[in-house]
Amino acid sequence: MKKCRICEGRNLHKFLSLGRQPHCNRFLREQDLALDEPAYPLDLYFCDDCALVQLGYVVPPEKMFRDYPYVSGTTATLPAHFQRLAQEIVARFDVPRGSLVADIGSNDGTFLRGFQQLGMRVLGFDPAVNIAALANEAGIETVPEFFDRDVSARAAAEKGKAKVITAAGVFYHVPDLPDFVEGVRALLADDGIFVVQAIYLLDMIEKTSFDNVYHEHLCYYSLKPLTVLFNRFNMEVFEVERAPIHGGSIIVYVRQGISRGRKESVEALLAEEARRGLYSLETYQEFACRVAGVREKLVSLLRDLRAQGKGIAAYGAPAKGNTMLNYCRIGPDVLRYAAEKNPLKQGLYTPGMHIPVIAEEKAREDPPDYYLVLPWNFLDEFLEKEREFRERGGRFIVPIPEPHIV
Ligand SMILES: [Zn+2]
């Protein structure tokens, strides 16, 4: 890797290596376990010029997104979050009924459904053919393509310009940011709003949530590099807010043209980022030390429990869980299975560590003493849902920010 993905600078510093890992969403069938499993370097770099944190190695997107097992609708927290956000956007920017709202990386249409209920015309873009088909069946029109300049121009010609374009949880996937932003510009009305939601680097650093790092996430955003990116394309970040979703995210509001005035929220967050050291390499080197500490503590905690004869299983089999398991080398000798709600993953094995993924209902028939909760960002929801397990003495091991038992 030679150039920064946003500013094209060459002052990149590697500060964290999570080893070679298979693609975190490439779950395996039993008959594939004996086959060679491709693995790729998972290393993070910091750009000294624009402060973007990014992966050094890019797995070709065709290998990652065409058959995608993640469905936004599987937890209760996400639909509620997106419905609230849709209402807020429509109210705050006075979006007239009947306006076109486009969502890039629209998954099963969870976000767009909120806009549709508010009387908007909606259009999704998602390259995962299987998931786009689900959305289309459910009445959310979805283009099964990678979003780029061409796909966007075609949509604009067919549907007109969009008043609102959203990109939640996709912006860090984009291999060619300039092409993507040009695509947004082609589809966005002159007075339209582009809303980006991304996992926030400051939260990731403070919580030591290194499990957000996987091959699909090419970039890890603080606000500053986003302002640099959009300025390059004559667009402006004019407002920003933080949200608790996914363990800490930012929602960034962008519009066409520059110097129509940034809101105080933008200046305030930039100042806070500088104060918290997000623009300096040492902050990231310290983060890397804490990551190694999490591994050490988690592995010894699990080893002690196993030595006491306790049964342990994984709760959930999310992408981020595979970063954790593969980095810590936690396999089926420690975790009997991963209990998972998403039927697309059930019956398969986790990439790398090959832990069998079973249905939640099946896990209830044979519960462990301890669950290692991998989607820890939804912990509150799980504590409520697994009340019975906990009342019978079952416990959750939460790996982040420091391994602990609840
Ligand atoms: Zn840069």
Image (cartoon, grey):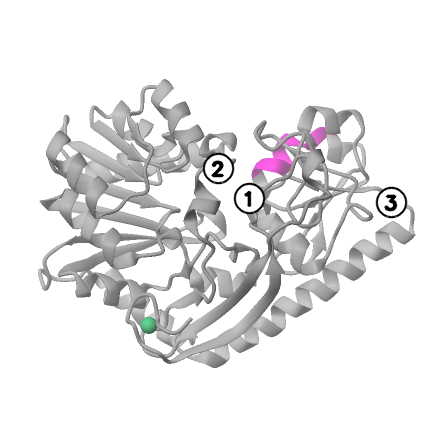
> In the drawing, what numbered circle is on residue 237?
none
* Kind of residue sitting beneath label 1: Asn
Sequence-earlier tag: 2 or 3: 2
Q: Quadrant of the N terminus?
A: bottom left
Element assignment for label 1? loop
Q: Are marks 1 and 2 in contact (CB under 8 Å)?
A: yes
- Circle 1 crowding by C-alpha within 10 Å: few under 14, some 14–19, many from 20: many
Left or right: where 68 falls relative to 29: left
Would you name the residue on which mark 2 appears?
A: 68
* Kind of residue sitting beneath label 2: Tyr
The image quadrant that residue 373 belongs to is top right
Would you name the residue on which mark 3 appears?
A: 310
Return the x and y of residue 118 as percentages of the image width and height.
24, 26
| Range covered by the magenta-colored residues | 381-388
Camera-nearest residue between 248 and 347: 347
- Circle 2 crowding by C-alpha within 10 Å: few under 14, some 14–19, many from 20: some
Alpha carbons under labels 1 and 2: distance apart: 7 Å
